[in-house]
Amino acid sequence: MDLNRTDFGSDFQWGVSTAAFQIEGAHDADGKGLSIWDVFTDSRSIKGGHHARIACDFYNCHERDLELIKQLGIPNFRFSLSWPRIFPSGKRPVNLRGIAFYDRLIDNLLEQGIEPWVTLYHWDLPQLLEAKGGWTNRDVVEWFSDYAAICARHFGDRVPNWMVMNEPSVFTGAGYFLGIHAPGKRGLPNFLKAMHHATLATSAAGRVLRSETKSANIGTTISCTHIEPKSALMRDIAAAKRVDTLLNRSFLEPLLGMGYPMDDLPVLRKLLPLLSAGDEQKMAFDFDFIGLQCYTREIVRHSIFTPYLKAAIVPASKRKVSFTEMGWEVFPESIYHLLTQFSTYRNMPKIIVTENGAAFRDVVSDGKVADTARQSYLKEHLRQLHRAKSEGVKVDGYFVWTLTDNFEWAEGYNARFGLVHVDFETQKRTIKDSGKWYSAFLKGDASL
Ligand code: FCB
């Protein structure tokens, strides 16, 4: 059956997502402070030695990309605010030139009739706060709450939709446990502190946004991955349950007032010494929506070699399945399973898919990018989303990751996720076939 935009309902929110560090560039413009990602990229930790000092030059030329959004007919634009642009030292005083940039961006979006969706934190912590321990220092809850208050006061009159955090499991796991993302810290003690403080900061900033804005739509985003055991053996099933608990439940359940899922992931008991009286209540917040971000599934087996988890992931490259440039399996049913899984929580708010997309090797030929694989990835995921919605799951939006190719964290510029191709030498934009298809779909001229 062909599916059209109208089959998702007239209230369904369609959009495209981005993040400040991945697109803005202008790393030291107009008084901006350093972020942990500026420092991490300077230490040549990224593939190819890539850095994001210019990235997509969005800071200087954002009008060009807003024109593209307008031309493509995408009604909602998700972007993040750079904390060190607004607070160069991480705390007050405010950098008014940083505020002025976001004022211009928001005003331009509204002039173009595009609705802003703002993420407060998409991983670019001010370096001066990292010097004080960053997410491992409990004071970060206060620092972040004050930053949230300033953002709400400056932009709350024009921004109707807010997301507090982007994927806390990823920035704490990759940044404070594995050391493959900024700030490059490792080890369980760092991870657990960062996890607990990020959770407290998420709900605290949710409360700040609620009190500082009138009727804002307030959410936060969670990374999730559909998990399946490698075999029907009990030990593989148990390993899969632990990984599911870590990746899909540990950062969400405390926000829903359920505390950390320590019974299903015993290593989380090591959080107990970090919990102060009243933390369980403080971690909960009544969000208007949860942003679900899903790209793939993982197959998990028991492994005695992985400390704490006793589980290992079987890479897609070893499973005779198709996978993207990130090595992530293309498995659209994932989004259906996750939407269904998340909707079983008694007090789950509505869900918006705030990121979904794929990196493939794109070639510009005769001014075109024939990215059929990305196009079918998006279509199949939307079909699976529709399947969940038609079975009653409250899912009210879908945002493609991402508008233009950009700086893909540890992968640098090698992984291209955009609907629009970027030549990073010239900053030339070329709308890919997937972008043309998304546009036609949104205009009612194409179906799934
Ligand atoms: C998500 C991040 C986003 C982007 C995509 C590919 O985990 O939130 O910034 O890198 O993955």
Image (cartoon, grey):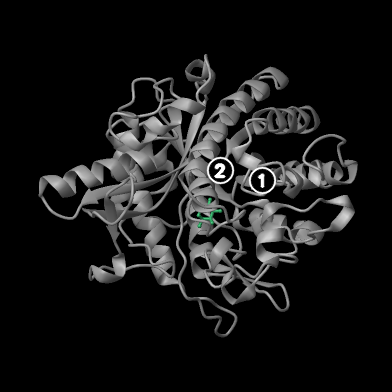
Mark number displayed over residue 80: 1
**Is 240 on the left-hand or right-hand side of 110?**
left
Specify whether tag 2 is near ligand 1 (CB below 8 Å). Answer: yes
In the image, 214 versus 74, the foreground residue is 214
Q: Residue flagged by tag 1: what amino acid is it?
A: Ser
Mark number displayed over residue 390: none
The percent coordinates of residue 200 (x first, y second) are: 56, 27
Q: Secondary structure at mark 1?
A: strand
Q: Secondary structure at mark 2?
A: loop
In the image, 193 versus 443, the foreground residue is 193
Query: Measuring 59% from the left and 27% from the top, which residue is drawn there?
Result: 217
Q: Can you name the residue that lies furthest to the left here? A: 233
Q: Which residue is mark 2?
A: 166
**Is 196 on the left-hand or right-hand side of 319?**
right
Mark 2, residues whose alpha carbon is within 10 Å: few (<14), some, or many (≥20)? Answer: many
Disc 2 and disc 1 in contact, CB within 8 angstroms: yes
The percent coordinates of residue 192 (x first, y second) are: 48, 38
Q: CA distance from mark 2 to mark 1?
A: 9 Å
Query: Measuring 60% from the left and 80% from the top, which residue is drawn there?
Result: 367
The percent coordinates of residue 336 (x first, y second) are: 30, 44
Q: Is residue 419 visible?
A: no
Query: Measuring 24% from the left and 46% from the top, which residue is drawn there?
Result: 240
Looking at the image, residue 426 lies above or below residue 109: below
Q: Residue flagged by tag 2: what amino acid is it?
A: Asn
Query: Measuring 37% from the left and 41% from the top, which residue is drawn there?
Result: 246
**Is 1 on the left-hand or right-hand side of 16?**
left
Judge depth for marks 2 and 1 and give the one in front. 2
